[in-house]
Amino acid sequence: MSKKIYEMITNQIIEKLEQGTIPWRKPWINGVAVNWKTQKPYRGINTMLLDGGEYATFKQISEAGGKVKKGAKSHIVVFWKLTKVKEKDEKTGEETGEKITVPLLRYYRVFKVGEQTEGIERKRKEKEFNHDPIEEGEKIVNGYINAPDYTYHSGRAYYQPFTDVVNVPPLKDFEKPEEFYSTKFHEMVHSTGHKDRLNREGVKGLASFGSETYSKEELIAELGASMICGVAGIDNHTIENSASYIQSWLNALKNDKTLIVFASQQAQKAVDYILNVKFD
C-alpha cells in the first residue's frame, strides 16, 4: 500500500511541476526575518543568513532616534543589483563601446532590533494559532525508531547532523496545522541521512548551500515529506507548496526532471525507515 502512495505523490508532484511554479512561502508566521522599516520578509539566501526578527541598518536606527548596543556585531544581507558595463570582445578583450546589463552581488549590514538596539521598538506583533495536533501525524513522529532529538524554536526549520537535532517552529506558529507536520516530516527525512541511519551523501558530507549535492538532498527531503503526508492523509493541503519548493531546487539543477526519479527512490528509503516499513 505504501509504495502505491509513494508513486501517487510523486506523480502529483510531477504534474504540478508541469503546470508551472507556484511561489513558495514559509508556512510559519512567527519568527520570520523582516526589514524593520518596510516589514517585508527577507528572501533567498538571506533567510538562511538571518534568524527570525526585525532588522535595520545603522542609518535607519539612528534616524529613528535609536542606537546600536555597544559590542553588537552586524549581520550581512545580500542582494543583486543590475548595473551597466561596457561589453568586451571575447577574442581581444577590448571594450566594444556597447553597454550590457549584468547582475552584481552586493551586501549591506543590519542589526536585530530589540536584541542589538536601544531606543526603538519592534513593530511586528506575533500571531498565535490554537491547533489540535493531527493524530496520524503524531503517530508517525512517535513511531520513528532511533529518532533524532526535537526542538521547537520559532523562525527556522533545520536538521543539524553533528548534534542530531531537528528544529521546527512550534505548532502555534503555523496558520495550517498540516504545514507544521509537512515541515517536521521534511526535517525528519533529512535526519535519516545521518551516518548512523541511512548514511546519505547529502547529510553525512558538508554540502554547501546551492551545490548539486545539497539540492538533491532537498529534493529527497521534500519528496519524502510529501509521501509521509500522503500516508497520514494530509497530502492535499501541502502538495502545491511542496511542488513549488521542489521546482526551486530543480531550477538550481538546470531543470532536470529526471532527478525526480532518483530523489523519489532515495525518499522512499527514508520514509520506509521512519515508518519502520520493510518490504520483501
Image (cartoon, grey):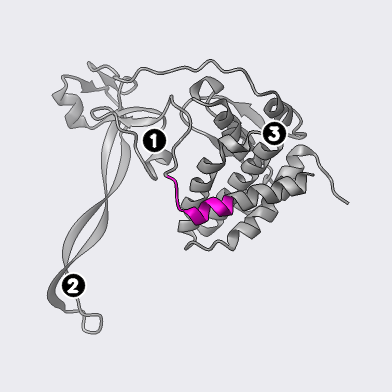
Local SS, label 2: strand
> Could you say which disc has been placed on residue 232 in the image?
3
Q: Nearer the observer, disc 3 or disc 2? A: 3
Q: Which residues are magenta?
A: 13-22
**Nearer to the camera, 14 or 100:** 14
Q: Residue at x 58, y 50 (%)?
A: 13
Residue 28 pos. (x, y %): 47, 29
User: Which quadrant does the N terminus fall into?
Assistant: top right
Residue at 43% x, 40% y is 48
Q: Position of residue 166 (x, y in %)?
A: 60, 33
**Reading the chain from its start, which is encountered first: label 3 or label 1?**
1
Q: Which residue in the structure is indicated by mark 2?
A: 87
| Residue designated by label 1 | 50
Residue 257 spot, x, y in % from top left: 55, 61
Q: Can the viewer see residue 133?
A: yes
Q: Quadrant of residue 109?
A: top left
User: Which label's residue is closer to the chain start, 3 or 2?
Assistant: 2
